Amino acid sequence: MRPEKREWTGEQDLFRARLDQIINMRHELVRLAGTIDWDWIDGEVSGCFSNEGRPGLLTRFMVGLLLLKYIYGLSDEEVCARWEFDPYWQYFTGEEFFAHAFPHERSGLSHWRKRIGGKLEAPLAESLRVAHATGALKPEDMARVTVDTTVQPKNVTHPTDAKLMLTAIEKLGALAKVNGVGLRQSYARLAKRAALMAGRYIHAKQFKRATRELKFLRTRLGRLIRDITRKIGDNEVLQKLFSVLLSKAIRIRWQNHNQRGPKLYSWHAPETECIGKGKAHKPYEFGTKVSIATTNRRCKGGQFVLHAKALAGNPFDGHTLAGVIEETQALTGRDIELIYVDKGYRGHKASKPLGVFISGQKRGVHGTIKRELKRRSAIEPVIGHLKSDGHLGRNYLKGRQGDHANAILSAVGYNLRLILRWLRLLLRMLLIAIRDVSSPPSTLMQAS
């Protein structure tokens, strides 16, 4: 059921302290909370709830927690723990009185994030509106954008054939033991030793011995798959229980590191993809490709992220440009005039009226366009901040929906960090101006 709205009473409480009496009301988080249109966000996500059942958790409380999590780069547990002793955070999430305990289950944050997964563009659009309302971003700044792609790594270990086959053997054996399926042999002890020796042989560049251990693992995994298939052949309940695990195990059994096409790189995150970005220090990354669009010029408040999207299936960069530009224009409400991209976007399918300029291009590049094309590389430090200060550097959320949510919320957190810095700067300038007016310079001559 749609969450209820909390109304502030404005009254005193004998046993509780009002937050607006114990915090600095000029603090940047307080000012940001007063600028965000919480009612608009509540209206946007209201369609994610049914009209029956128990009311959901308060929209401002849960959205505020998500924003704080991605502003400060914390986990779900850390943001809930800090909320208990930080009055500014409690005020930001809509509390009127100071609370000494977290009022909800921490798992509610995960459930709420999954529920509003299709409406996560609303906080990003609101962050751009707040930036415009505070003077950090102008509408004309969003007319010329820079687009680039990066990799959002999943929280998985480096995949090897030995690790994957060992995991498949262990998972199948554990599920068979729980459900009382008697196996001829589990191969748990032998498989563990074979995977260990395969890693040692590869490290020592003894590839023939490593191949022998991998063949041993592949043979034992095949035996285990056939044994389980025979034992559950007449039991439909067990067939449903083992269907997902057996399908993963069969894929791992037959794939090899030289094959082309889709592969399984992680047992618990099958959506993980192998992406090569041409980096010398990191030839391959395992995760999801993400498209980032930023303003080309540095605005008063900084270089804001206008659009972020996880791209499943590792598509060619150029084929994604048309969709990214269309979604960015819908998100910002402003038509884009010029787009600046790198050489990975050659062969793009963007419509003709849009001016797309590729790094290294010579034809038609002069004057202002030449200067702005030189600023294309300014998107790289933005991506670096998204990864180091936010959660784009390692995604802990599950599934394709988790990839999408982490990419968008990382962009929202980055924009709000810029806005908070802008609000601190404005407050500092205001205090300096007040000081200069209240204490005029002395008319006495300085000693020589």
Image (cartoon, rainbow, N blue to C red):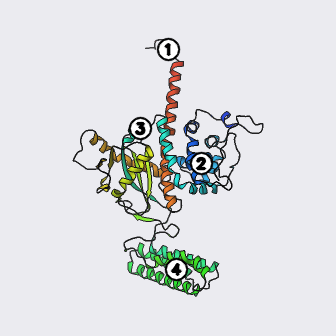
Q: CA distance from mark 2 to mark 1?
A: 49 Å
Q: Secondary structure at mark 3?
A: helix
Residue where numbered disc 3 is placed: 139
For the question of whether residue 192 can be seen, the reply is no
Q: Residues within 10 Å of mark 2 (few under 14, many from 20)?
A: many
User: Which amino acid is tagged 3?
Assistant: Pro
The answer to whether residue 117 is left or right of residue 302 is: right
Residue where numbered disc 4 is placed: 191
User: Which amino acid is tagged 4?
Assistant: Ala
Does the CB distance between marks 3 and 2 fall below 8 Å? no
Which circle, 3 or 2, is nearer the viewer? Answer: 3
Query: Mark 3 or mark 1, which is nearer the start of the sequence?
Result: 3
Query: Mark 2 or mark 4, which is nearer the start of the sequence?
Result: 2
Q: Looking at this view, name the residue that lies furthest to the front.
A: 51
Question: Which residue sits at x=49%, y=83%?
Answer: 222
Which circle, 1 or 3, is nearer the viewer? Answer: 3
Residue 307: percent from left, percent from top? 43, 49
User: Which amino acid is tagged 2?
Assistant: Leu
Q: Secondary structure at mark 2?
A: helix
Query: Mark 4 or mark 1, which is nearer the start of the sequence?
Result: 4
Q: Residues within 10 Å of mark 3 (few under 14, many from 20)?
A: few
Residue where numbered disc 2 is placed: 65
Of 19 and 335, the residue lying toward us: 335
Q: Residues within 10 Å of mark 1 (few under 14, many from 20)?
A: few
Of 157 and 96, the residue lying toward us: 96
* Above or below, comparing residue 206 to residue 337 in the picture: below
Which circle, 1 or 4, is nearer the viewer? Answer: 4
Q: Looking at this view, name the residue that lies furthest to the top.
A: 444
Which circle, 4 or 2, is nearer the viewer? Answer: 2
Residue where numbered disc 1 is placed: 442
Q: Secondary structure at mark 4?
A: helix
